[in-house]
Amino acid sequence: MLISVTPTFAAKWLIPNLPDFTAAHPNIDLRIMATEKVSSFQSDGIDLAVRQGSPPFGASLDVTLLFKQTLIAVAAPSITRDAPHSFEPETLSKLPKIHDAHDLWPSYLAHLDVPDQSPRGLRLSQTSLAVDAAIAGQGVALVSRFLVADDLEIGRLVEVGEAWEAGGNDFYVLMPRTAKNNTPVVDVLTWIKARSAAAL
């Protein structure tokens, strides 16, 4: 049973939730392909895929929304020591930024109606690396809330800017319509849907 997901989804959501999956489905051998490229269900032998984007994804696929793209600005507690709550947009604009491949900081700051006044920021190829850099105190990262829910809960990160519904780049799970009678695939899909709903 092969599932294709982005590296960040694998590192920050799927792998941390695997103990629950293993307990619920000990007989399913789940293999994870973590890649940014658009994989082919048929030629790559993929049973399920989790991707960001906007429907339609293809008439041959069943599509389920997992998470809306709700972006938040997060930083290590050390950066926010002097500010018990979220920063004002003007203050946030001056903090060092951590950029990932999506580079949504310009759009986010435009949404807040403030210019970017930060020093030169750190640029990384993966959102998961941006999260790790934020935890290490390297600056402020802009990430989907569900990817850092655990980090926020245990205090490794704090939210320092208002949430933004970016729209048009939500997280979906995709399954070929031909897999509807494949019990392991349906079981994994059901588990992902239930686990994602519990995280909201």
Image: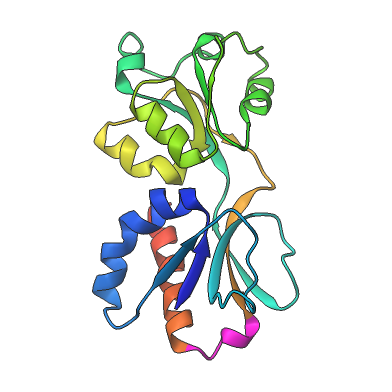
Q: Which residues are magenta?
A: 177-182
Residue 43 location (% of width, % of height):
64, 77
Horizontal side of residue 76 vs 129, given as left or right: left
Residue 100 location (% of width, % of height):
56, 34
Please state which of residues 177 and 102 is positioned toward the viewer in this rendering.
102
How many numbered callouts?
A: 0
**Residue shown at 71% from the left, 78% from the top:** 60
Quadrant in which residue 150 is drawn = top left
Q: How is the image coloured?
A: rainbow
Residue 72 location (% of width, % of height):
50, 32
Residue 196 location (% of width, % of height):
43, 59
Which quadrant of the rendered structure holds the N terminus? bottom left
Residue that sits furthest to the front in the current view: 43
Quadrant in which residue 194 is drawn = bottom left
Please state which of residues 48 and 115 is positioned toward the viewer in this rendering.
48
Quadrant in which residue 154 is drawn = top left
**Residue shown at 40% from the left, 50% from the top:** 11
**Residue shown at 54% from the left, 18% from the top:** 121
The reply to whether residue 84 is in sight is no
Examine the structure image and report whether residue 188 is included in the region drawn in magenta: no
- Asked if 112 appears above or below 50 in the picture, the reply is above
- Asked if 144 appears above or below 138 in the picture, the reply is below
Residue that sits furthest to the bottom in the current view: 181
The reply to whether residue 18 is in sight is yes
Please state which of residues 38 and 61 is positioned toward the viewer in this rendering.
38
**Residue shown at 61% from the left, 51% from the top:** 170
- Asked if 120 appears above or below 9 in the picture, the reply is above
